[in-house]
Amino acid sequence: MNRTTAESVIGYFGFPRRSTLHEVRERFGFDTPLVDLDVDRGAPDSGVLPATTCRIITNIIDNAVDLGNRLDAVVAAVGEDKCDRGRHAALILKRKGFNVIESRFPCDEYEDRPLVYSRCSMPLTEKINRIMETVVDPSPADAGPGPCKPTHGFWGVPPHDFRILDSFPPKTHVYGWTRCVVAGRPGDLSLECYVDEGVPTVFFTQSFCAKQDLAHYLAEHYGGLAVDCHREVNDSILAKVEAFIRLS
């Protein structure tokens, strides 16, 4: 973001490491005011997040968008000291052009397993069941068929009601947190956000899950369909998914 004639500020949210905050202030000047983006600053609704989002996370996004070019940087707490929605807010602000400096505790080492099942031709229900079995056994005897070219995509976590999966064709690729599971990288936000360009994708979350923010944003970014469902799938949701798959 470019500086403007208005007073520049450093935004932050959560409880960033003091050393990280000190380094950022050292870079931009200790006289640059600090602004807590968590609090209500009277910013207008940015329209970036759905209405069901936690009010604090909404404040972060609305305040940052309202401050705009005045923000020299956003110091974002994205570790275990902040919920997943803190990580999502940081990612969205990055993609909207803000200078985001993340603060986190060192993460455990991730694995780097091959993406078996997530890219093969197989009924989606069976595919996701096999992926979740890798949580217990990361080296299944049957690695499944090789990767295929995707006709559609399913992004998200395994649904409570698997009936929603019956609408998808066998050549559906699995994205989101479920793909992170098979890769042995459940906290890899970059991998969670990866979707092949041009693949018609349904971005699924359970209602009120923190990942709803990410699904909403990515669905708009990739031109997909965002669907949230509380407990059982209803006829309206099934019809919406089936229409999206058929028309795409």
Image: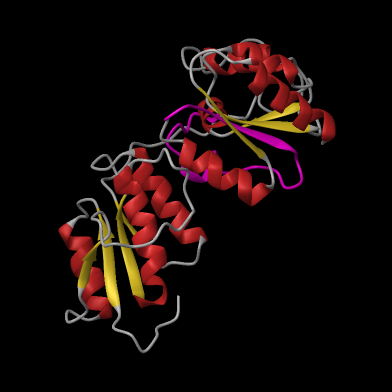
162 relative to 32 in the view: left or right? right
Depicted 94 relative to depicted 246: above or below = below
94 relative to 70 in the view: left or right? right
Res. 161 image quadrant: top right
Taking depth in this image into account, of 96 and 39 the one nearest to the observer is 39
Res. 242 image quadrant: top right
Whole-percent x and y of residue 220?
A: 62, 48
Which region is colored magenta? Answer: 183-208
Residue at 41%, 71% (x, y): give it.
68
Whole-percent x and y of residue 90?
A: 40, 54
Residue at 66%, 16% (x, y): give it.
235
Taking depth in this image into account, of 191 and 71 the one nearest to the observer is 71
Residue at 45%, 53% (x, y): give it.
91
Whole-percent x and y of residue 99?
A: 41, 68
Taking depth in this image into account, of 6 and 100 the one nearest to the observer is 6
Whether residue 5 is visible: yes
Res. 151 image quadrant: top right
Quarter occupied by the C terminus: top right
